[in-house]
Image (tube, grey):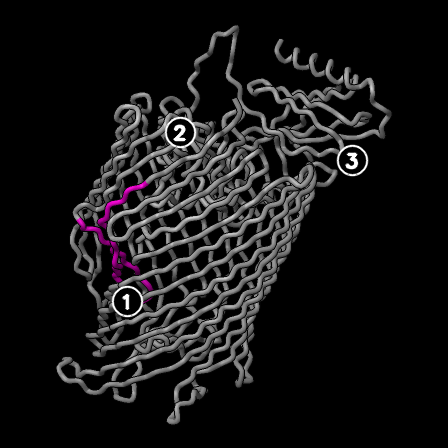
Amino acid sequence: MAHLKCIILLNAFWLFCSFGADAQTPRKVSGTVIDSLKDIVSGADVFMIADKDTLTTVTDNRGRFSFGGIQTDNISILIMRVGFKPYTMSYQYREDQLNLFLYSIMLHQEANLLDEVIIKARDKPIRIKADTVEYNASFYQINENDRVEDLLRQLPGVEVDANGNAFTMGKPLQKLRVNGEDFFTNNVKDFIRQLPAGMIDKLQIINDYGDEANFTGMKNGDSQKMLNLVTKAGQNNGKFGNIAASGGTDHRYGLQGNGNFWEGSKQIGLNSNSNNTSNDAGINTNAGAGLNYRDKLSSGITASAVYNYAYIKNLSSLDNSIETVNPGGTIFNKMNSDSRSTDNNNTINFNIQSIADKSYFQASLGGSMVKRNRDANTISNQTGLIMQDLLSNTLSNSETPNLNGNFVWARSMQKLGRSMSGGVTLSTGINQVEDDLGNRISYYSQDKDVLLKDSLVKRFVETENRTNNVSADFRYSEPLRASLDSAVKQNIDFAYFFSFNKTRNSLYTRVNNSIGNNTVVDSLSSLYSSSFILHRFAVSYRYQSKKLNYSLGVTAQPSQLTGQYEGNETRIDHVELNVSPIVNLNYALSDWDNLAFVYGGASTAPDFYQLQPVPNITNLQNVIIGNPNLRSSFTHSGNLSFQHTDEDNGATLMLAMNGSVVEDQVVSNVVLVKDTLNSLKQQTHFENANGAYQFGSTYSYAVPFSKNKFNLELRGTWDYINMVSFANNVLNNNKNINFSQSLKLRMNERRLTLSSYATYNYSSNRYSIALLDLRNIETWQFNVNGRLNVGKSWVVSTDMSKRVNSGYTIDVADPLLLNFALEKTMFKSRQATVTLQAYDLLNQGNNLVRSISDNSITDSRYNQITRYFLLSFNYRLQKFGRK
């Protein structure tokens, strides 16, 4: 009856308005109906009310509908489908408009009401379908002032680190949308800390292949993880922001202000900040400001503009312990570097986009300017096979302007399922660097008791690298004969991709002569240019149904790498052809189980520094010389994933396995050469080699219990990597094993939230030349954090973590970190808070990182200020939705 009343009232309204209407040229309206997962909704009843007439139709198997012969300027659309809330909206044609193409109309699920008796069927916590995992926000416990960030921390398979970066199954969430629309700058980190958790109805994590692929259905290549937030009804608008100020010991401070206006597709945001509390690597001072704007220019056309400025000053002291293995012995290097750097970054971007019923286009233009100044002093002490000390000072200035633009167009043809698309991308950039290098090398006898000689070298190096890139693609899809099952679609897809990359690198090295003038050192200067041309031809068969979707085909990738070194008439010209299959499979085993497999192949050209055949003397203990004869490499990669949700209790299992093999990988060849004192020094060259591969797995198993007040999660990763390199022209295989296992328990009560986890990490590697013993590092980390609401306005939170390290070459304690915070909510609106925070009360913080590259193992540690107290005031401005 309620739906019938809607129809009668709309008819009565337009009957009243029609008395003054004149005859019009017949017009047309069409649209597409989808649900919150962006799946098509077929079989929905669509009513179009125009003047005195009410026309009806039903959406087809692609969710589409259309009406013609419209004589009035104003129409209303009513859409109804069992299980969804009715959708109604009025539209007005422009004076000269004949065809009205509506955006994809989203229907929201409806609760079941029978004469004021509420059917309290428990919503399912998770839905898994195709490329999307959807979490029901009502299944998780949230408090009044919780943000979306707090909600994400409760989702199985999702992690949010201390800096607000979100990950799922080890991959970052790189894009943000709200109700399927781009949201401000798409910056996930910034907005999950601002949006209230209470306004969210669903959270969707999507394997996104880009808008062009979503429009045409042709999904190739790697996807990125996107977070789409579906708001509760009436919550798609608001004004929000905050003002914050803080100050503390050790001269810590922070200032922040931002404001955002959001009204459907219209979005305006301003932000600014200045602080020195980010100390992940060294001691940093950050400042920045930004402006973003997004709005509809007309029906179906959205434009946006973004500008950001960032200033970063870094003071750091870095300790490195490096072990380099060579057939002749092992080189041990203890290095300390003190540096000061400042960065000024400016970025700007303009974008325009149109998504209509049968066409899509997007164009953007962006640019950036990065300026950096750096002053560093380094002391390097080498022992073992080479006995040297190096004292160096580097003054470096760089400028990196970049400009890029792209255009994408796609269209669905009159024949159902036929589509084509194309795009062009242009980019150009310059990286200009001026280095003032001062080095002093001390040569010792093998027992390091006798100083043989000191060598003082001062050089000025100017480098300019210019890169220009043009790429274009074209795709065409032809539907095959329709199946008896209307939900089944079959297509043959054709794709072509072209890329041209041109690099020109100039290197000039100067020294002071006897009369104080700078002269160019020809042997250390060069002008080198290279280009890489790639074609990719692909043909595949695509099958789509309710449960099974897959693409099978083949791709051929011919490529050409050319290069020329000024002063040498020899030209480099390598032509290669790589052929690989196309496999993209997604199978819904049931409503709660999903299996997916993706395979891809890609060609990669060597970097310019790997090609340039002139010594790079930035580090005199390891001079780098490129190889102009390098070939491009080709990577085969595959990923298999499985997701399962228990329908009754919401237990979730997510499993992913991946692997890759690289052909003609560009690897280093570290050789030892004698200098004028008959001492040894390292030189890094580059070669092509086969044999590099890796495979691994990631999993997460989460079980909620006690009405979701508790959640137990077991997650882990395992990787086996075979890295290939050369040492003194001898092939070296480094077999690396990484294993991580975590057990996490979270409790969510109305006033108390507790979370604890224990993590074990293990990493080992062994070189085939067997000069190093098996190098293992192991870490145990235990963490407990809690948040207690006391009364109506006080919050106490604490965080405790203990880390136990073993296997590092740098001496380090096993830190116990204790953090504490006391928060007071103020004012009647409860939008203001005063917080006292204490970080690292025992002053034991340190960061220790191991990295493995080629034939070297490096343990690194930066300086940090970890113990300080901070008093903060924050006033949150927010008003979402309408009453």
- Can residue 589 be seen at all in this image of the molecule? no
Residue 661 locus on image (x, y percent): 42, 57
Residue 315 locus on image (x, y percent): 31, 62
Q: Residue tagged by mark 3?
A: 97
Q: Answer yes or no: do the residues labelled 2 and 1 have beta carbons within 8 Å?
A: no
Q: Residue tagged by mark 2?
A: 645
- Can residue 62 be seen at all in this image of the molecule? yes
Label 2: state its secondary structure.
strand
Q: Is residue 63 above or below residue 741?
A: above
Q: Answer yes or no: do the residues labelled 2 and 3 have beta carbons within 8 Å?
A: no
**CA–CA distance between discs 2 and 1?**
51 Å
* Lower position in the chain sequence, tag 1 or tag 3: 3
Quadrant where the N terminus sits is: top right
Q: Is residue 378 above or below residue 57?
A: below
Q: Residue at x 50, y 39 (%)?
A: 260
Q: Nearer the viewer, mark 2 or mark 3?
A: 3
Q: Amino acid at mark 2?
A: Thr
Q: Which residues are magenta?
A: 843-872
Instruction: Decide whether residue 850 is among the magenta residues.
Output: yes
Q: Nearer the viewer, residue 602 or 394?
A: 394
Q: Residue tagged by mark 1?
A: 338
